[in-house]
Image (spheres, rainbow, N blue to C red):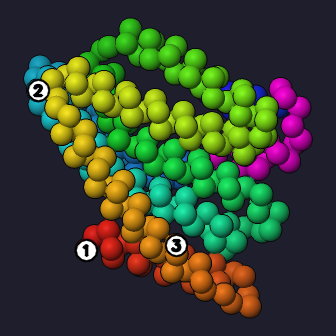
């Protein structure tokens, strides 16, 4: 925790650079906190009660991953695509440098959503040694990404590193847990494919349409872009 902030500080980047990253990181977590936070609070006790039936435990966690990914992943991609208008509408120009940081971080947070119920499942099964091993591996991967990218690219490099770390580790962990518990490859594909592919295309179409919109008042432009992109993206995704 906080290794990204500490790396920026240790490499003597400015307070503004660290602040922009801190701002973008916290903003990028809002979608996942909104859905995953509430789900985890309900899911963990439910999985604990099913400890006598591992098969039902697995099916419950898999269903939770499917639901969470279906909702939160495209919203995270939407947040990434619309990072610029979002900051323009809600915040002052002071935070403009955080736009690309928010974009990369939001992608990482979006892909990470599927793994959260599986993490709750392994915890409910009491696999604490496994958690310790995963933490050690994650730390190695995190450092391997963050140190060089931050050194060469500053807070933008940190954002790209964290995105890469989240995408890589969460996807591998999800696949490993599914296979370990007797799941099939189609379980993984079924959860990731539709939200990633269809959600990505839907958000891209919405972004391309609103990128052609221009108004004299920036905040009005941002609001219209956000609303229009959401309507187009959600219509295509759910249609």
Q: Which of 32 and 49 is in front in this view?
A: 32
Look at the numbered discs 2 and 3 and tell me whether their residues touch, using CB distance below 8 Å.
Answer: no
Against 25, residue 212 (above or below) is below
Disc 2 secondary structure class: helix
Q: Is residue 5 visible?
A: no
Q: Is the magenta stretch mostly helix, strand or loop?
A: helix
Quick one: label 1, few (<14), some, or many (20+) residues within 10 Å? few
Disc 1 secondary structure class: loop
Q: Which of marks 2 and 3 is in front?
A: 3
Q: Residue 180 carries which label?
A: none
Against 46, residue 29 (above or below) is below
Q: Can residue 152 be seen in this view?
A: yes
Residue designated by label 1: 239
Q: Going by the image, does 141 lie left or right of 173?
A: right
Please identify the quarter of the rendering in which residue 147 is found: top right
Q: Nearer the viewer, residue 156 or 221?
A: 156
Residue 12 is one of the magenta-drawn residues: yes
Residue designated by label 3: 207
Residue 128 x/y as whole percent: 37, 12
Q: Give the range drawn in magenta.
A: 10-27
Residue 145 x/y as whole percent: 63, 29
Q: Going by the image, does 108 lie left or right of 117?
A: right
Please identify the quarter of the rendering in which residue 188 is found: top left
Measured in 3D between alpha carbons, the distance from the residue under mark 3 to the one under mark 1, in whole angstroms, is: 18 Å
Residue 50 x/y as whole percent: 15, 27
């Amino acid at each position: 925790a906080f290794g990204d902030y500490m790396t920026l500080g240790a490499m003597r980047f400015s307070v503004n650079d660290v602040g922009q990253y801190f701002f973008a990181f916290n903003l990028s977590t809002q979608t996942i906190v909104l859905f995953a936070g509430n789900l985890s609070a309900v899911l963990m006790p439910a999985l604990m009660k099913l400890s006598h039936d591992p098969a039902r435990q697995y099916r419950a966690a898999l269903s939770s991953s499917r639901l969470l990914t279906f909702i939160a992943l495209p919203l995270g991609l939407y947040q990434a695509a619309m990072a610029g208008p979002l900051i323009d509408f809600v915040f002052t120009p002071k935070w403009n440098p955080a736009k690309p940081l928010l974009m990369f971080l939001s992608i990482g947070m979006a892909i990470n959503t599927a793994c959260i119920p599986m993490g709750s499942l392994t915890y409910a099964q009491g696999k604490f040694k496994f958690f310790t091993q995963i933490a050690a591996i994650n730390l190695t991967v995190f450092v391997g990404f963050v140190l060089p990218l931050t050194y060469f690219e500053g807070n933008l490099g940190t954002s790209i590193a964290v995105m890469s770390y989240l995408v890589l580790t969460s996807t591998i962990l999800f696949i490993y847990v599914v296979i370990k518990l007797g799941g099939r490859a189609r379980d993984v594909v079924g959860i990731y494919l539709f939200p990633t592919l269809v959600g990505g295309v839907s958000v891209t179409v919405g972004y391309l349409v609103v990128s052609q919109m221009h108004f004299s008042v920036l905040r009005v432009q941002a609001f219209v872009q956000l609303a229009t992109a959401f309507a187009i993206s959600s219509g295509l995704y759910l249609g």
